[in-house]
Image (cartoon, grey):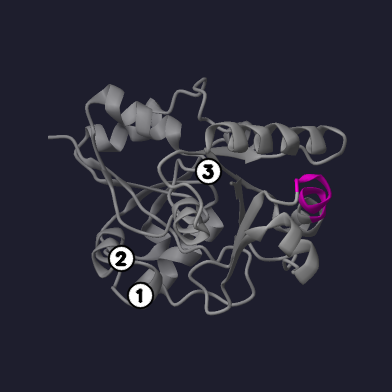
């Protein structure tokens, strides 16, 4: 029999000063399954080992960290993503064909959602390997639920252009789509660019457009704001530069 590919969520505290409390951010069953895996496919081996060390403090790992088989996805997958295809991940799953279970993990949240990993999941289906997503935090869904925006019709559009005028043009396009269709538009940014993106949004959005932000989700310091662009300007809210944040706009 073939093994199973487990999609293992990670806490949303990557890059944050204070870590999340692991057994509050993830269900016990997810942590127990992760503790029993010896084979891993990941973005970064160093952060994966750090995550496994945190799991080990709650549920002893099935083997030593040194004995874990941790395989990083290629650098080009990190840079360009693997959501559109083009990368053959089937060789990474040879151990699953031999009967071993494999964990797929990203640096934060659910692998293959706003992070690499789709190619591995596609390869598993092609090879007839069972795919099991484990329960854990997904920042996009948590943001949408907490925003009060349309949760029946929404889209995640990834990163916006980093520079103007392309960024302002993209914001205007997404705002027009949100007003025309009612579809909530979700996007993210590298944390050190949070302030620049917020400034661009407040300079571009119409006063009545609703802007929601969710920063540091699952942390004690988490902040969620959702109100009109006009109200945002009046309140003068800011976003920390080093905290992962999801942005959403809608009507």
Mark 2 Cα within 10 Å, few/some/many (few <14, many 20+)?
many
List x then y, in percent, for residue 202. 79, 53
Tag 2 near tag 1, CB within 8 Å = yes
Q: Residue at x 43, y 47 (%)?
A: 151
Q: Which residue is mark 2?
A: 31
The segment highlighted magenta reads: 199-206
Please, is residue 30 above or below residue 144 in the view? below
Q: Quadrant of the N terminus?
A: top left
Residue holding disc 1? 23
Q: CA distance from mark 1 to mark 3?
A: 23 Å
Name the spot of residue 123 as percent of width and height, x first.
Answer: 35, 27
Q: Is residue 87 above or below residue 79?
A: above
First along the sequence among labels 2 and 3: 2
- Distance between the alpha carbons at the discs numbered 2 and 1: 8 Å
Work out whether mark 1 precedes mark 3 in sequence or the reverse, and give the earlier one. 1
Identified at 45% across, 23% down, the residue is 88
Marks 2 and 3 sit apart, C-alpha to C-alpha, by 20 Å
| Front in this rendered view, residue 15 or 40 | 15
Residue 115 is tagged as 3
Q: Which mark is residue 68?
A: none
| Circle 3: element type | loop
Query: Label 3 near label 1: C-beta < 8 Å?
Result: no
- Does the image show residue 236? no
In terms of secondary structure, what is the magenta stretch mainly?
helix
Q: Residue at x 42, y 61 (%)?
A: 66
Residue 166 drawn in magenta: no
Local packing at callout 1 (Cα closer than 10 Å; few below 14, some 14-19, many 20+) is some
Nearer the observer, disc 2 or disc 1?
1
Quadrant of res 158 = top right
């Amino acid at each position: 029999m073939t093994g199973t590919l487990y999609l293992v969520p990670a806490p949303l505290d990557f890059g944050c000063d204070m870590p999340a409390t692991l057994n509050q951010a993830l269900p016990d069953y997810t942590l127990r399954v992760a503790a029993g895996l010896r084979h891993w496919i990941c973005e970064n081996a160093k952060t994966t080992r750090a995550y496994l060390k945190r799991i080990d403090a709650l549920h002893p790992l099935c083997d030593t960290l040194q004995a874990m088989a941790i395989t990083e996805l290629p650098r080009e997958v990190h840079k360009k993503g693997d959501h559109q295809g083009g990368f053959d991940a089937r060789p990474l799953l040879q151990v699953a064909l031999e009967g071993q279970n494999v964990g797929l993990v990203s640096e934060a949240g659910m692998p293959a959602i706003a992070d690499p990993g789709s190619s591995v999941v596609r390869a598993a289906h092609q090879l007839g390997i069972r795919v099991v997503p484990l329960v854990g935090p997904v920042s996009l869904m948590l943001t949408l639920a907490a925003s009060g925006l349309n949760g029946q019709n929404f889209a995640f559009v990834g990163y916006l252009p980093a520079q103007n005028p392309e960024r302002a043009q993209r914001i205007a396009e997404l705002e027009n789509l949100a007003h025309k269709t009612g579809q909530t538009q979700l996007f993210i940014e590298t944390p050190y660019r949070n302030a620049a993106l917020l400034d661009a949004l407040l300079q571009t959005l119409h006063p009545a457009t609703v802007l929601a932000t969710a920063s540091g989700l699952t942390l004690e310091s988490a902040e969620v704001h959702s109100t009109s662009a006009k109200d945002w300007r009046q309140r003068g809210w800011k976003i920390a530069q080093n905290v992962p944040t999801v942005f959403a706009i809608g009507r």
